[in-house]
Every structure is written in structure tokens, then in C-alpha cells.
Image (cartoon, rainbow, N blue to C red):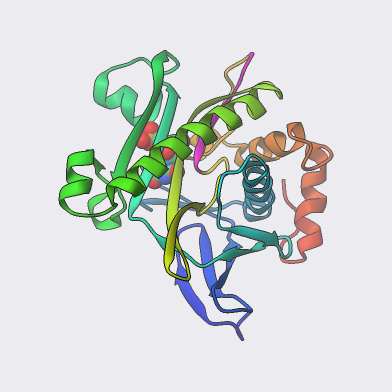
Amino acid sequence: MSRRRKIYEGKAKILYEGPEPGTIIQYFKDDATAFNAEKHAVLDGKGVLNNRLSEFFMTRLAGIGVPTHFLKRINMREQLVKKVDIIPLEVVVRNVAAGSISKRLGIPEGESLPRSLVEFYYKKDELGDPMVSEEHIAAFNWASPQEMDDMVSTALRVNDFLAGLFSAVGIRLVDMKLEFGRLYEGDTVRTVLADEISPDSCRLWDLETNEKLDKDRFRRDMGGVTEAYAEVATRLGIIKQTSDLATVVDINGERSGAK
Ligand code: TMP
């Protein structure tokens, strides 16, 4: 790995230069952070699971015509993606109130929203990713009107598709965060889905019990974080059963003894 040029290291992933121009390798770390990295832990196997889960969602979405940066999974922790310029916005889609919308607007967690809502947050760690309006985005030119249209329509399409995919396996897609990039192809620029889709970036609740199967388990010190991610992967048929987790992690050869 050291022979490769590291382009960027984030909280949960490292980006390396890819084998061909215009490609990037995304390495999924086991690190988990919350509250703008105030809280940090290493969760054995999380990176392996998120690599597999994100591959699954991106591939399925490409199958319905959603443009994404994903090319292929290379190994347990890495995937090859197209190099894009990340648009500096987090696009959040919400179906059910939870997290910051519950806090900000006083809507009890778990209450269904009248319709799916799309929100924007400016990607700026120093500021704690503040929520911004379309007015701010236009005025500061963070995204063009065309890119805004592309992001909103794609976000709603991704939400509809993933909500269906999850509900078929007894999971409610409460909300999720998407990121988009600019893909330069000759003279044209396309807006494509980028980054990752995983239980780090979604809220997923069991349909029957409302048990949390996502990163809120880490944010709220509930324990069983990796087990919950493995449960999601198992229900989607990505790994055979939750007990495979130990194998999933061992195959990687980097860590063993996953709980
Ligand atoms: P929020 O309720 O805290 O605003 O989060 C909304 C969704 O966005 C939730 O699915 C978690 C995800 N999210 C991220 O992926 N990264 C972040 O930094 C934050 C704050 C939320």
C-alpha cells in the first residue's frame, strides 16, 4: 500500500491514486467518528462491511441508471472508483424524523415526515458541516442550478429505490446522507453519486422492533455496531449469516478476533 500515492485521508476512508489516470482507490478503514471527530473508535470489521455494502448499493443503483463513481471492488477493503471533484455539500434525505431534524424542529424521533425532505449541509469540518439553503448554495456558487436539479432528483430516486430494497428485508430507511461529484469526460461534466452508501451514512431501523442498525449505535454508545452492520449485510444477502463476520474479517488478514 505504501507504494501508492495517498491523495487524501478522511475519518473513515483513505483515497489513493488509482492504477489508471482518472481512477482512485477508496480504502475503507475500521475507524468510526462522531460529533465532528470528538468521539473516535476502531471497530473491527466495519471497513470490510462498508466496502461490501457500498459496492452492493452503488451496483444496484447503476442497474437502474443512476450514474455513480463506482467501478469495481478490488479486495476486502478497497474499491476502484472514478476520480471526481466532490461537490462540497452533504445531501440528506429524510423519511422519518430522527437526529438533527428532531432536535432542531422538535419533531419526536420516529414520527413519519409528511413527505421525503431533502436538506443540504456545507461540507466544512471546521464549522461542523452547517445546514445551508439553496440561496446560500447559489450565492456562493457551491453548485450550479443544473447540479442542484441533478442532485435533488437523483437523491429522491436513490431514496425511493433504497427504501424499497430495505423494506423488502424488514428495514426502514429513516434517512441518509449522499455526496455527489463532478465527473469530467472530455468537454462535458456530469453529476455522479460518489463517496459511499453504508450504515455510516444512513439511519436504518428494524421495521418491526425499531432496533437501530446503523451508526447511531456508535454515536449513542449502544454497542453492537459491527454486528448491526453485519445484520444489514446478511439480510441483503451480501454475507451468508452474521456469524460470517469473523470470517469476513479474518479473510482480510489484517485483524482477527472480531466480536
Ligand atoms: P443528522 O440527523 O445528524 O443531520 O443526520 C442525517 C443523516 O446523515 C443520517 O443518516 C446520518 C448522516 N450523517 C452523515 O453521514 N455524516 C454526518 O457527518 C452527519 C452529521 C450525518
Q: Residue at x 56, y 79 (%)?
A: 21
Residue 56's x, y, as percent?
69, 45
Residue 167's x, y, as percent?
65, 22
Q: Residue at x 53, y 36 (%)?
A: 158
Q: How many marks?
A: 0
Q: Is residue 97 visible?
A: no
**Taking 173 as reference, is 189 left or right?**
left
Q: Is residue 224 above or below residue 210?
A: below
Image-quadrant location for residue 233: top right
Image-quadrant location for residue 198: top right
Q: Is residue 10 above or below residue 57?
A: below
Q: Is residue 202 magenta?
A: yes
Residue sitting nearer the eye, 253 or 129: 129
Residue 180's x, y, as percent?
44, 51
> Ligand 1 is located in which of the four quadrants?
top left
**Taking 161 as reference, is 98 left or right?**
left
Q: Is residue 206 magenta?
A: yes
Quadrant location, the N terminus: bottom right
Residue 191's x, y, as percent?
44, 53
Q: Residue at x 25, y 21 (%)?
A: 105
Q: Residue furthest bottom?
A: 3
Residue sitting nearer the eye, 90 or 36: 90
Which range is magenta?
A: 201-208
**Taking 95 as reference, is 42 left or right?**
right
Q: Tell me the chief SS of the magenta region.
A: strand
Quadrant location, the C terminus: top right
Q: Residue furthest left?
A: 139
Q: Is residue 72 visible?
A: yes
Q: Residue at x 65, y 54 (%)?
A: 51
Residue sitting nearer the eye, 195 or 135: 135
